[in-house]
Image (tube, helix red, strand yellow):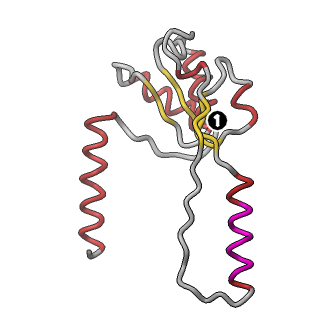
Amino acid sequence: MDQDTVINLTAQAMNLAFKVAGPVLLGSYTIEFGRKAARELLSSRPLPDAVLCGSDIIALGVVRELHHCGVGVPDAVKVTGFDGILFSELCEPPLTTVRQPVQTIAAESVRLLQLRMDGDDAAVRRSEIAPSLLVRRSSLAGAG
């Protein structure tokens, strides 16, 4: 498949996702971007049922801005982050997050590097390490 076909298919997939799930907002992995994204969502009513953020830091900004604007989390909008940082449980309400198994990822990286250093010239290996979902109040119906 050539690059133009891949780009075209990617654009079609994003358009379909937008129609089904709503807008995809891209920005930095900061609290300020989360606040800005929340303001964008607030200006384009109706509000989504849920917001899935690319990091817990962004999600903290979304929750903070929604709260600042009087929008209840999770009653009006449910919010989920990604990374599993320690501060996610200090959020009010505590943030649902997708936790990355960082120690497992690091151990697998070291193991694969050691194989290379020991002369294993096998083709690139694929490792799959599943994250886990840590459900907290920010995404639970009727929990606000």
In magenta, the rendered stretch is 106-115
Residue 25, position as x, y percentages in the image: 44, 41
On the image, the x and y values in percent for residue 134 come to 62, 32
The residue closer to the viewer here, 57 or 101, is 101
Q: Determine whether, in the image, residue 77 is placed left or right of residue 81.
A: left
Q: Main secondary structure of the magenta part?
A: helix
Local packing at callout 1 (Cα closer than 10 Å; few below 14, some 14-19, many 20+) is many
**Toward which corner of the image does residue 85 lie, by quadrant?**
top right
Helix, strand or loop at label 1? It is helix
Residue drawn at (64%, 18%) of the image? 93
Q: Is residue 106 above or below residue 79?
A: below
* 107 magenta-colored: yes
Is 37 situated left or right of 82 in this image?
A: left
Residue 33: name its quadrant: top right
Q: How many marks?
A: 1
Image quadrant in which the C terminus is located? top right
Q: Position of residue 99 (x, y in %)?
A: 63, 41
Residue at position x 58%, y 36% from top?
Answer: 133
Going 70% across and 90% down the picture, which residue do you hit? 119
Question: Is residue 36 shown in magenta?
Answer: no
User: For this rendering, which residue is in front, 31 or 56?
Assistant: 56
Q: Pointer 1: what residue?
A: 31
Q: Which amino acid type is shown beneath numbered disc 1?
A: Ile
**Residue 17 vertical placement versus 78 (above, below):** below
Where is residue 61 drawn, in percent x and y?
61, 30
Give the camera-side residue of 101 and 17.
101
Question: On the rendered image, what quadrant is the N terminus found in?
Answer: bottom left
User: Residue at coordinates 26% horizontally, 71% vertically from top-left?
Assistant: 4
